Amino acid sequence: MIQITGGTVITMDPAYRVVQADVWIDESYIVHIGPWEKTADVVIQAQNQYVLPGLVQPHVHLCQTLFRGMGDDLDLLDWLKTRIWPLEAAHDFDSVHVSAQLGIAELLRSGTTTILDMETVSHTEGAFHALAQSGIRAIAGKCLMDEPHPLLYEPTESALKESLDLAAAWHGFDRGRIQYGLAPRFALSVTDDLWRLVAEEAGRRHLIVHTHVAESQREVQEILAHKGLLPMHHLHAMGLTRGRLMAAHGVWLTKDELTIVRDYQVGLVHCPSSNLKLASGVAPISTWQEQGISFGISADGAPCNNRLDGFEEMRLAALLQKPLFGAKSMLARTTLTQATFGGAKILGLDDRIGSIEVGKEADLIMVSQKGVHHQPMVYSDPYSQIVYQARSDDVSMTMVAGRVLYQDDRLLTLDEERVIGQAEKAIRRVADRANIL
Amino acid sequence: MIQITGGTVITMDPAYRVVQADVWIDESYIVHIGPWEKTADVVIQAQNQYVLPGLVQPHVHLCQTLFRGMGDDLDLLDWLKTRIWPLEAAHDFDSVHVSAQLGIAELLRSGTTTILDMETVSHTEGAFHALAQSGIRAIAGKCLMDEPHPLLYEPTESALKESLDLAAAWHGFDRGRIQYGLAPRFALSVTDDLWRLVAEEAGRRHLIVHTHVAESQREVQEILAHKGLLPMHHLHAMGLTRGRLMAAHGVWLTKDELTIVRDYQVGLVHCPSSNLKLASGVAPISTWQEQGISFGISADGAPCNNRLDGFEEMRLAALLQKPLFGAKSMLARTTLTQATFGGAKILGLDDRIGSIEVGKEADLIMVSQKGVHHQPMVYSDPYSQIVYQARSDDVSMTMVAGRVLYQDDRLLTLDEERVIGQAEKAIRRVADRANIL
């Protein structure tokens, strides 16, 4: 039994309770909140800390962590074609493995406990080994790309087969901590045959489908030219909206497409830094919110951000709406809800995680209030403090399923120095093969 | 003599040299860069660190640091009228003093070495004492507001007289480290009589004038209604463009007003977080850049941000331009230039600070490359790393005029715990008097 004592608990429960209370964890579950007569095996001191649900980032690419800083100042399609695809194509098992480890190290340090991850076409097994060993909660999948392409391409059949083999091996691992998600890249990389097969297999196996949609105007135009349909209309026509579809970005979705999103409960993922850096635009998440569309907030991959920092994304998500929709749009509490419970909900995990409530799994973080950037705190609102003031280095503890993975500047499941050393070797190897520099 | 050894020096000199070299500091000056046969009294180890000029933030309000988190979700004019002015009017000498100390603590920890600071109407002496004692470089001034207002207002004559008395007391203090800047708040708070007097006195005494201009559309409309002129046209008509004018924000300056800005070398200050949070908009700094307009980058005050973090502002300044002007707008190097040398230049301090060059004062910072969020570094560009990846907690040392003010998580001129304790007491006192909660 673990007792987290002395902290201020931002529960994110339906009543939005913020309480000065102990949180008790037995095995992987939250078993009690408040005073209790029991004795814990481990007591974690949380004085001057907020205790809150871990951040959920439902759109990352761990295989790209090695490419950090190697794709600056390019718009989406140029960035993909001249940097990301050649680099992804040059990956090997070990480089995918260490890229995932490096990304997970950054995510755990900055308070993210759950991710939806899109890997590349090959060597996805490397990422699953890293995810399994690290203790983070993840839904991951190999990227599906069967439209002929000189570098990154697979025949339809074998692409799907490898996905299903990976799903058979990893879906449900460690009592469901790891799941498989089918990951067709986006409309331009995937044939309609494969889209239809993905929809079918996802339905049969109850798997999430994870893709990109309406990220940039140029992409929307190319999809319209190639498929004769707007991106969400195309996914709808292919049958993807029958199951649980996660669509990243959605910056340029039309009103009509947003109706489909809402009616078929598609989960959107807002990636504010990435949308700015790749010159894509600003997604109208205030409108999504008003229309009852479910969405999460995420950092995307390292080379379009260049960090994987959920706190940075929350702050930006809130701030960016205000010039467009007024100072009262995307209030701090709403923003934190989307970054925790909202992300869990679109992933179908809201019965297990996303808030601090008895019976849920203990995916939670501690955030220090001690920094001068939080002072004075006398009249502070906790949500405002978390969204506008907190920095990811305020995170002092990260726990997934009752297991402490990061505490007091130390990662407990990853040898950080070793990972960094291996990452350096791996990116040299991958960049040499990609031959783009 | 101080020797900073083993670091990578991002000089920001005219050739943009980035060198692996030692920096030697004698008294307050940089006296040598590179190997030298001399022996230093103090050796600072900078392995795995960047050494770069300290950030210059040419628009802050230290007197508002106490109000952090007390003005969320309001647009500019409501924010001023319902929160900031009542709170400023309730300040006393001690609360102004500790508000400045708290702000300076945050600024030094996050690598800012020079500020242009606008205080409130009264008790500005409190801020000057804090500035003087802390070691930070600052141009500061009391806020001028002589348009009749129930809370924050002074007769024209006494407002100006107190400013000039403060200037006489503080301008040039500590060999010019502290300067006085006349600070008329903005068009709507200042009578035309006072604008003309300010222009005259600034010219006579060679003082900077620090004000706000074209921050929000509503403000521009009100200025047009009251003065019959657009904000910059009004300042021009009042004679302010004859001297060194610092105008914060400029989000809504028209093409015609920008011509005046360029022709009369007005210094603009971009405050990206503040402009988003108060729903003002996004300033077109790419256009400013193209037109040869000089500008700095700054955090504004704590209640409209809610941090004073120059790294956050740099990152945001770069990212926000890209959806508007393309992925290649506001490159990382350009952004860092504006946040260091650019700020120094508009303040007329570019002969003394803003780059690491022999003969300049030693205002510099060290930024650690060690965090996982910087890895792998094999193919990283240093400017990209500083602008897109670095966090303010990567700052490991802050030096102003050759004096170490912050090192290894410790402020050397401020007793942080005492400041935080006093800040809490002060904001209770001020909020009680303001009676707005």
Image (cartoon, coloured by chain):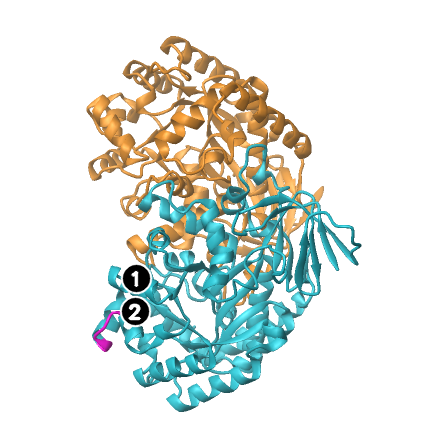
Chain colours: A cyan, B orange
Which residue bears the numbered disc 1? A258
Marks 2/1: CA–CA distance: 8 Å
Residue A21: x and y in percent read 67, 46
Q: Label 2 is found on which chain of the structure?
A: A
The answer to whether residue A163 is seen in the rendering is yes
Name the one closer to the observer, A327 or A311: A327
Q: Secondary structure at mark 2?
A: helix
Q: Which residues are magenta?
A: A226-231
**Above or below for B29 versus B146:** below
- The answer to the question of whether label 2 and label 1 lie on touching residues, with beta carbons closer than 8 A, is yes
User: Which residue in the protein does label 2 denote?
Assistant: A232
- Which numbered disc flags the more N-terminal residue, 2 or 1? 2
Q: Is residue A252 above or below residue B54?
A: below
User: Mark 2: which amino acid?
Assistant: Met
Left or right: B145 in relation to B234: right
Q: Which percent across, then down, holds residue B109? A: 59, 41
* Residue B410 within the segment the image draws in magenta: no
